[in-house]
Image (cartoon, grey):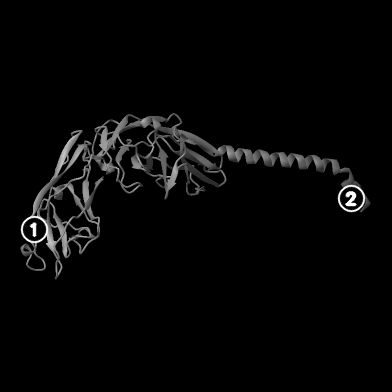
Amino acid sequence: MKLAANLVSRSKGYIGVLGRLVLGALVLVTFEAQAAITCGMKDPTYYRDIDISIMGPGIATVGEDFAAGLTFPIHAQTYTTTWNSGYGWKCSRAWNDPATTVQGFYRVQAISTPYGPPVLIGSTSVFPTNVPGIGMTFRERISHTPSENSQFPAKVDSALYVLDSPSSSVSASAYTGEGTFYVKLVKTGPIAPGNQQVLASSFPVFQFSVGLISPVASETKFMTIRFSGAINFVTKTCQVEDVDVDLGSHQLADFPKTGSVSEWKDFNITLKNCPPFHGYAFSASSYYHDENGNLTGDNRRSENTLDMAFASVYGNYNLTVANIEGGAGAAEGFGIQMAINDGSTVILSPPYTYNQKRLGITLTTSDGANYIVPLKARYYRYGSKPKAGKANGAITYTVNYY
């Protein structure tokens, strides 16, 4: 027992040295296991700098009443890249190495925002442009990526890949394919009247990268997208004037019963010095092009709309009959009706709008054009005991531009 104790005592120094040697060996083994897992870009030389130009005729008309928000874009286009498997990460494991968990990610971020950070509307980032009241949105979708994104910055982690196959090598890769990019301009607020030029250089610049979270953290950018060109927006309105309509003098006998009317009196409202109506690209399929410049969209544009609504200043007897002005010497039991070009009686309440086709006008791309809106008016008896007197009425009209 005593000899054993001495041996143990004399062995203390050796035990310490042996412990250090074992620890060093463990570290070495761990390092070699990590080194055996090789990770990197599928093609380390792959990188693309893409310039997306504004498509279309370069001019559009946006009425002052065009709705703000994402629902109705004022310009839209789609851009596609060709299929390529060069970008993406790849990890390989030798057959005799320990099992390893691999997870990657995909990131898109705006690395330049010339006119400030975006505003988030729903799940979409809206970037300001050089024209107040007009914003830009960008949506990207690369096939084989986990999702598509319209809110930036965007980072999407991949699923977990476990490399544990007994075969000689196992690899995991992701984020390969073709890219589709949707660019839209939307109204975000009032736009100054006149001619406004939106510069693509005011759009953000987007950078794409892929990387690994494990087993070794890394990130490599593989694509940058920037924009070029310009598009002009016409935002002015027509000039309008008051119109006096003489409905003539009449006798009570001319209106023998309730519902009696006078003859229609024709008159016109002239919309002067109107803007050119170029329309606008509402759908992304209107301008669908690829990196080789091939246009595959239908090149269609949504037509502008001009409509008018009418309202009585003195209230209404019913939906189509406007009251006349009351007061001393005023007639009683009479109202005024109006009709549009197709003969339909104008609805005054609730407010009802009539578009350019029903108003009998055709919008053109001529700047400064005048449009004549043909209308008619008449007296209408609704009272059971009418009274003669002045029968003056007033009806306002509102012109809306979309």
Q: Which mark is residue 5?
A: none
Which residue ends up furthest to the right in the rendered image? 2
Residue at image location 57% in from the left, 46% down from the top: 98
Mark 2 crowdedness (10 Å alpha carbons): few <14, some 14-19, many ≥20: few
Q: Position of residue 218 (x, y in %)?
A: 53, 37
Mark 1 crowdedness (10 Å alpha carbons): few <14, some 14-19, many ≥20: few
Residue topped by disc 2: 4
Residue topped by disc 1: 250
Q: Position of residue 100 (x, y in %)?
A: 55, 46
- Of helix, strand and loop, which one carries label 2? helix
In-front residue for pair 40/323: 323
Q: Which three-letter amino acid code belongs to the residue tagged 1? A: His
Q: Position of residue 227 (x, y in %)?
A: 36, 31
In-front residue for pair 322/36: 322
User: Is 164 on the left-hand or right-hand side of 227?
Assistant: right
Distance from the alpha carbon under mark 1 to that under mark 2: 139 Å
Quadrant of the snapshot with the N terminus: bottom right
**Quadrant of residue 337 within the rendered picture:** bottom left
Residue at image location 23% in from the left, 39% down from the top: 239
